[in-house]
Image (cartoon, grey):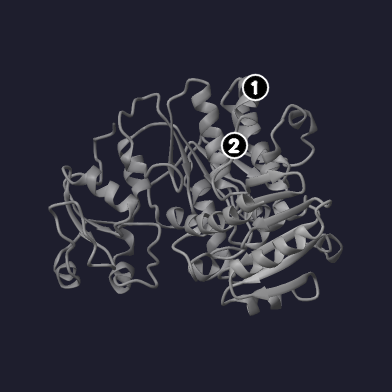
C-alpha cells in the first residue's frame, strides 16, 4: 500500500453521491481523513453515525478533495455551481484506489462490450490461479475489496463518466474496445465523449500497454492527432477463424462478442496466459444477465434478453447475425444515435416499439424496417406469441434489445431486464 505523500490522507474530503461507490469511498477513508457526505437525496437513510451535511454547511467548509460518483452530472445537480468553482479538486474512487495501491490493473472501456470482456478476462485470470478482482462498473466498487496483496490484479470496467472525472488514476494495461456516439446528452458533444475515453491512454506512462480496435474510425482519428507514451496494439477484430474454430459456445456467434474475444486473445497473449486453459474458460462462459442473454431456447423459439442495449450500435451487432427476428425496442433514444443496418438486412426482422418515445424511434427507423408501435411490453408480447403460435414449424427469435436508456419507466437496465423475464415466464410456462 502506498502511503508516502498520499493526497487523500489527513484532508477535508467531501463525498458527493452515496450509491455503492460513494459509500465504499466513505468506509475506506473515514479513518484516514475528515470525511463529509452529501447526496441530492438528503432523505437517504445511512448506516453511519455521520449525517449528510447541508448545502449551507458545504459553503462554509474549505474542502481539500471532492470525490464524486460517476452518476453525478456536474452540469445538472444540486452542487453544480460549487463543483464548477472547485473543479480542480474533483476526484473519483479510482483515483483513491490508485493513490493507495501499486497493483497492476487492466482497465477496459468502450461504447459496447465492456462488461462481457472484463468478466471473461477476470474468469480467465482466476482459472489460471491469479488473484484477480473485478471492480468498477461491474463487480464490486473499487474501494470495497479486502485482503489486497502485491500479486492482486485489478480488472476494471470504466465508463466515460468515471474516466472524465478521474484526475490521477492510470492503468498499466488500457483497453478501448470501440467508440460510437453515446452519452452525448451528458458529454455535450461526441468530441468530449471520445476525449473522456482517451483519458485512459493519455494518463499512461512509458512501459504501459494499450489495446484498441484497429478499424474503428473514431479511435483512428484520435490516434493520428495525438501521441501517447504507452505501446499501442491495434486489435484486428475479424479473420480469427483459427482461434474461433476451438470455441464451442453459442454466446459468441455475434460480431460484438467475437470482437470482445479478439481483445481477450490479444491481452491474454501479452499476459502470457495458457491458451488451452483460456479456451476452456471461454467455452464455459454463460454470459451476463441481460446482455445478449438467451433466456429460452427450444424447437421453434429462441428468446434473447439484451436489456443492457442502450444504443442502435449495440443492437445491430447482434441483429446482423440473426434471421426471422421479432425485435422489441423502446426507452429513451440516445441523442444523435443512428440506425445503420441496410434495408436488405433489415427485411429479416419485424420491429415492435413500446413506450413514450416511440415517435422518436419511428423517425429514425422509417423507410428501413417494418415497424409497429404499442403502449407497453405486454401488448407487444401478446401479439408476437399469437403470431408465432400460428406458424409453429418456423424457427423464430424474440430479441429484446431496447436501443435506448431505461429511465423512462425503470430504475436501470437490470430492472427492465428482470421485468421482461417475468412476462416471458407467463408465456413459456403456459406452452
Residue behind mark 2: 286
Q: Residue at 66%, 37% (x, y): give it.
A: 261
State the image coordinates of residue 176 (x, y, percent, origin top left).
Answer: 58, 47
* Quadrant of image for the N terminus: top left
Of residue 207 and residue 193, the one placed in the foreground of this image is: 193
Q: Quadrant of residue 65?
A: bottom left
Specify whether residue 308 is in view: no
Which mark identifies residue 314?
none
- The numbered mark, 2 or 1, whose residue comes first in the sequence reads 1
The residue depicted at 56 percent of the width and 26 percent of the height is 271
Identify the residue at image location x=56%, y=35%. Answer: 120
Report x, y in % for residue 258: 70, 41
- In this view of the protein, can residue 105 be seen by the observer? yes
- Decide: few, some or many residues near mark 1? Use Cα within 10 Å; few <14, some 14-19, many ≥20: some
Q: Would you call the spot at circle 2 few (<14 residues within 10 Å), some (14-19), or many (20 or more)?
A: some
Q: Is 246 on the left or on the right of 292, as rendered?
A: right
- Residue ID for mark 1: 275
- For residue 68, which quarter of the picture? bottom left
Considering depth in this image, is 218 or 274 the residue closer to the camera?
274
The answer to which of 297 and 403 lies nearer the viewer is 297
Q: How many marks?
A: 2
Expressed as whole percent of the image width and height from the top left, the position of residue 285 reads: 60, 34
The residue located at (72%, 30%) in the rendering is 248
Circle 2 — which element? loop
Horizontal relation, residue 295 to residue 42: left or right: right
Task: Give the Cα separation between the discs numbered 2 and 1.
Answer: 19 Å
Amino acid at each position: 500500500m502506498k502511503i508516502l505523500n498520499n493526497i487523500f490522507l489527513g484532508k477535508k474530503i467531501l463525498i458527493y453521491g452515496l450509491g455503492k461507490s460513494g459509500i465504499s469511498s466513505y468506509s475506506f477513508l473515514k479513518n484516514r481523513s475528515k470525511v463529509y457526505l452529501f447526496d441530492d437525496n438528503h432523505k437517504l437513510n445511512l448506516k453511519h453515525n455521520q449525517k449528510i451535511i447541508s448545502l449551507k454547511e458545504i459553503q462554509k467548509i474549505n474542502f481539500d478533495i471532492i470525490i464524486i460518483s460517476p452518476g453525478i452530472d456536474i452540469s445538472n445537480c444540486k452542487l453544480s455551481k460549487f463543483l464548477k468553482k472547485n473543479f480542480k479538486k474533483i476526484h473519483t474512487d479510482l483515483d483513491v484506489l490508485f493513490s493507495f495501491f501499486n497493483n497492476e490493473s487492466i482497465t477496459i472501456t468502450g461504447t459496447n462490450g465492456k462488461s462481457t470482456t472484463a468478466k471473461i478476462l477476470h474468469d480467465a485470470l482466476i482459472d489460471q490461479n491469479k488473484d484477480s478482482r473485478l471492480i468498477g462498473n461491474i463487480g464490486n466498487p473499487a474501494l470495497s475489496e479486502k485482503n489486497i496483496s502485491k500479486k492482486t490484479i485489478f480488472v476494471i470496467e470504466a465508463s466515460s463518466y468515471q474516466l472524465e472525472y478521474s484526475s490521477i488514476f492510470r492503468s498499466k494495461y488500457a483497453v478501448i474496445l470501440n467508440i460510437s456516439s453515446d452519452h452525448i446528452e451528458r458529454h455535450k458533444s461526441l468530441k468530449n465523449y471520445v476525449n473522456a475515453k482517451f483519458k485512459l491512454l493519455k494518463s499512461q506512462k512509458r512501459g504501459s500497454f494499450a489495446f484498441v480496435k484497429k478499424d474503428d474510425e473514431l479511435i483512428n482519428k484520435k490516434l493520428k492527432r495525438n501521441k501517447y507514451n504507452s505501446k499501442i496494439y491495434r486489435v484486428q477484430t475479424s479473420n480469427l477463424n483459427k482461434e474461433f474454430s476451438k470455441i464451442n459456445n453459442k454466446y459468441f456467434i455475434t460480431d460484438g462478442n467475437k470482437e470482445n474475444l479478439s481483445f481477450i486473445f490479444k491481452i491474454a497473449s501479452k499476459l502470457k496466459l495458457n491458451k488451452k486453459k483460456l479456451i476452456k474458460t471461454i467455452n464455459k462462459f454463460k454470459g451476463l444477465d441481460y446482455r445478449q442473454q438467451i433466456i429460452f431456447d427450444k424447437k421453434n423459439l429462441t428468446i434473447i434478453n439484451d436489456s443492457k442495449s442502450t444504443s442502435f450500435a449495440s443492437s445491430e451487432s447482434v441483429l446482423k447475425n440473426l434471421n426471422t427476428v421479432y425485435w422489441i425496442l423502446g426507452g429513451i433514444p440516445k441523442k444523435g444515435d443512428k440506425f445503420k443496418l441496410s434495408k436488405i438486412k433489415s427485411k429479416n426482422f419485424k420491429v415492435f416499439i413500446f413506450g413514450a418515445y416511440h415517435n422518436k424511434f419511428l423517425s429514425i427507423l422509417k423507410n428501413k424496417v417494418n415497424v409497429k408501435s404499442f403502449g407497453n411490453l405486454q401488448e407487444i408480447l401478446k401479439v408476437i406469441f399469437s403470431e408465432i403460435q400460428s406458424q409453429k414449424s418456423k424457427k423464430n427469435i424474440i430479441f429484446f434489445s431496447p436501443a435506448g436508456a431505461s429511465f423512462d419507466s425503470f430504475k436501470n437496465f437490470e430492472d427492465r431486464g428482470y421485468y421482461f423475464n417475468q412476462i416471458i415466464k407467463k408465456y413459456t410456462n403456459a406452452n
